Amino acid sequence: MSKENTSSEVVDNNVALESGLPNDSKLTDPNVVDWDGPNNPINPLNWSSHKRWAHVLMVALLALVTNMGPTMCAPSIKGLVADFNISSQTVSTLAITLYLLGLATGPMFLYPLSEMYGRVPLYHGASLAFVAFVIGNALSKNIGQFIVFRFLSGCAGGTPMALGGGTTADVARLENRGFAMALFSLGPLTGPVLGPVIGGFIAADKGWRWTFWMLAILGGAVGTAALVIMRETHPKVLLERKAARLRVSTGNPQLQSRLARYLTPRQVVVQALIRPAMLLLRSAVLLVMSLYVALVFGLMYLLFATFTDVFEGQYGFGTSISGLVHLGLGVALIVAMLLFGALGDRVQRAAMKADGVQLPRPEYRLVLMIWFSPCVGVGLFIYGWTAYYKVHWTLPIIGTAIIGLGAFFVLMPTQLYLVDLFGSDAAASALGANNLLRYLSSTFLPLAGPSMYRALNYGWGNTLLGFLALGFVPAPILFYKYGERLRARDSLKSV
């Protein structure tokens, strides 16, 4: 996709896809296979409403379960440390966060396979592998085995994040796509919050191994439901299957899908690995927004790592009750999704009216981020100083809720902005680069937490983190104002 791609071109491409009509010169080629008009029933956009929303909900649930993995064992980490005789705080932190490194690296290899074999086989295969590796965690005899299975389960668990956005776009029409993406994103966002709530009660009663048995049970249940409900949605795969059937039925070997790509499997994998890095290097917008998301998510996981010491150590919470402190974030994320659903379209229409334009600019997605992203820094200030002075436990939880509200409005507008900005051709690579930086930060930033808090305490330590978060607040403002100029300068044509 050329970097001169404007918002109107993106909209035109989406409209053409949804109408079932090609928007290029292949329209006149009789050997090109496309949808049979705008109402073709094999086009996922023409499925019944309940079937389309069932797919959105299904990928959200898959992402919910796999994103419970990073934090579900956090309340029981002391038991794991004792059983494996871990003396290093770095190793005990990695036992939790290494899963996130798997989430970062696994999708890099899984996504290109979906281009060749479709999304559904990967969902099913990854669900099976996820359950198997989580069971490996539950049966681990030493820390080495545990860490290996932890990483591998993360690699398999990254599949819903790698493919879920594409599945959502396959089945959600333009007018519903914002809400559908918000619903899908609620899974990855609430998973790390719900995990410790469940894990805390299980660990207090059954021990740390049962947290992994429960995660395997949940993964198996949702994976089985996906096996029953989900069907292939990838337009490229569906049209290639249709072309293959027509080649057999008509005897015409020249028939080819309109979306066919003539690349070898090796070329597809290499492109999927290299293209995100090239986009990061060539697009200042993608680089800055990805760093912002990476910082916010790294801060959230660093925050999770402090909950045990703060709420069990300073406030005297038991293991089961300490998991409940994550509910502040969970409630905030649900409120944020409702706000997004209520305000998103209204804000975009108001911005279009103010600018006197008929088609939306990608930068309109940033308005809500401009409004709410400062909440991350403000919430860190509140959490840090109320924990430092041991103010009533409700106030630190309110601080985490404010952080969660801000985090949602950093992640959600960024994803939609990148999809609008890069269009269908390069959006997957842009989101892949964004996810890679996010999970790398979430893996390694928490490792700096213990030494930082020893040196600066919770008050000044979280103040430092809060100022780092506030340092990125001008970014969406600048992109909103100068985004078109930057898009015209970024060189993405050859990527």
Image (cartoon, helix red, strand yellow):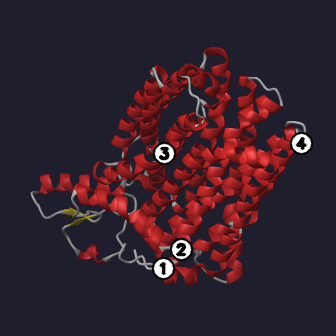
Q: Nearer the viewer, residue 29 or 66?
A: 66
Q: In the image, which is nearer the foreground, mark 4 or mark 1? A: 4
- Sooner in the amino-acid sequence: mark 4 or mark 1: 4
Which element is circle 3 on?
Answer: helix
Q: Mark 1 near mark 3, Cβ–Cβ under 8 Å? A: no
CA distance for labels 1 and 2 = 7 Å
Which element is circle 4 on?
Answer: loop
In the picture shown, does residue 243 fall above or below 481?
above
Question: Can the viewer see residue 60?
Answer: yes
Q: Which residue is mark 2?
A: 284
Which element is circle 2 on?
Answer: helix
Q: In the image, which is nearer the foreground, mark 4 or mark 2? A: 4
The residue type indicated by label 2 comes to Ala
The numbered mark at residue 101 is: 3
Q: Residues within 10 Å of mark 2 (few under 14, many from 20)?
A: some
- Sooner in the amino-acid sequence: mark 1 or mark 2: 2
Q: Residues within 10 Å of mark 3 (few under 14, many from 20)?
A: many
